[in-house]
Amino acid sequence: MLAARVPLGDGELPASFCSRLALRNGCGSAQDFCRDVSIIFREVVNGAPEALEQLAELGGVCAERLSASALRRTDDMFVAGKESLSRGSIRWGSLLVCPDCLAEDAHCWKELNAAAPYVRMVWQISCVLTCVRHDLKLVDILGADMCVSSRGLRRHDTARLIIARGNCIDKGRSARQHSPLERYVTDRLAGQSEGNWLDHFPLYAAARACEIVGSVAIHGPKIAVRTMDDVLRFHAGATGYQILSGGPDHFRSFLLESRTGERRRTGDPGVAALFGQLYNWLASEARDPVYQPLREVLREVALESLALDAGEKIFGLPIERRRFYSGLFRSRGNRN
């Protein structure tokens, strides 16, 4: 165990703890520190159990608690505590922090000086753009001028980045009410559940579904969902959460309302045209079974909304027979 140590913060990334420990012990960088104590820094970043156990022993902290806030690689996915995350769920090109959280750390551990502030794991989740504790926008401490030089392990040496970007952090302080999706994701990562429909989905799927559904709800079915910026992502996530947290019936109601509006604009479109990017996204995720409950609801609404012939396919599944409707929905056979 090292003589000069730092306390482990609640929800702290292991790389952040390692970086602060390195600073506290006068090392030039987190990588230098790890070389000196025979730990591979990249394995700390990747949440490798053996590396975290070594780091916990050196730092005099609970290994289980340190591992709980790691983003651990498992093949092509990541695990955070009990939650599953996709690569797209994690922020890679930036490193966001809350100015007030860092200020609180510095005040709480004054004796640590620059080694006091720490980076929370939840700030690495791509859909979390606001601090739910302080209702402040998270500030990027990499910035456009640092991204190229910080693509490697340097960007995980968080204590030194916080020192280098102190002015940027202070100037970036901006108030904003956190979204319900940000609260939901933060709570789930902390092991808390709200008991709604989204709890049945892996966290990465719940968050992404909210963003896609919300973007279509706000901007219509033609919105380019794969190129959402942070502003759209924030508002889309909030809107989508309000829809999907209400359960399959609420999602169905949203689809029925969307269907009615789109039919007024385009007449009698096909399934892909009627539901646009929402359908295309669910179709592109066909290999991932976790989205099947969403596909089933959309498929049922499509069958009730369009005069589709037997043999036509929705999400690759053929329709066994045409469903007939009166009033608003005319069968194709009666159009002439």
Image (cartoon, grey):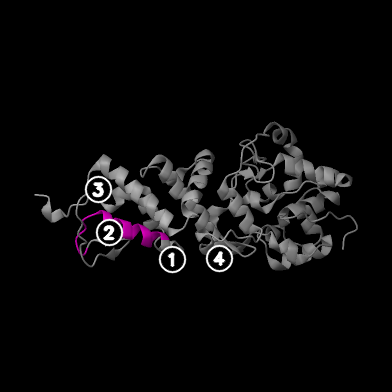
Mark 3 or 2, which is nearer the eye?
2
Visible residue check, residue 127:
no
According to the picture, the residue beneath numbered tag 1 turns out to be: 289
- Across and down, in percent, residue 194 comes to 58, 58
* Tag 3 near tag 4, CB within 8 Å: no
Q: How many residues crowd mark 3 within 10 Å: few (<14), some (14–19), many (20+)? A: some
Amino acid type at mark 2: Leu
- Across and down, in percent, residue 318 comes to 26, 65
Q: How many residues crowd mark 4 within 10 Å: few (<14), some (14–19), many (20+)? A: few
Specify which label sits upstream in the sequence, 3 or 4: 4
Q: Which mark is residue 269?
A: 3
Q: How many residues crowd mark 2 within 10 Å: few (<14), some (14–19), many (20+)? A: some
Specify which label sits upstream in the sequence, 3 or 2: 3
Q: How many residues crowd mark 1 within 10 Å: few (<14), some (14–19), many (20+)? A: few
- Across and down, in percent, residue 196 comes to 53, 59
- Which element carries disc 1, helix, strand or loop? helix
Amino acid type at mark 1: Pro
Specify which label sits upstream in the sequence, 1 or 3: 3
Amino acid type at mark 3: Pro
Kindly identify the residue that appears in the image at 43 percent across and 41 percent down: 218
Q: CA distance from mark 4 to mark 2?
A: 38 Å
Q: CA distance from mark 1 to mark 3?
A: 27 Å
| Looking at the image, residue 288 lies above or below residue 114 | below
Extreme-top residue of the structure = 171
According to the picture, the residue beneath numbered tag 2 turns out to be: 303
Mark 2 or 1, which is nearer the eye?
2
**Residue span colored magenta:** 294-311
Answer with the quarter of the image where residue 65 lies: bottom right
Q: CA distance from mark 3 to mark 2?
A: 13 Å
- Which element carries disc 2, helix, strand or loop? helix
Answer with the quarter of the image where residue 36 lies: bottom right
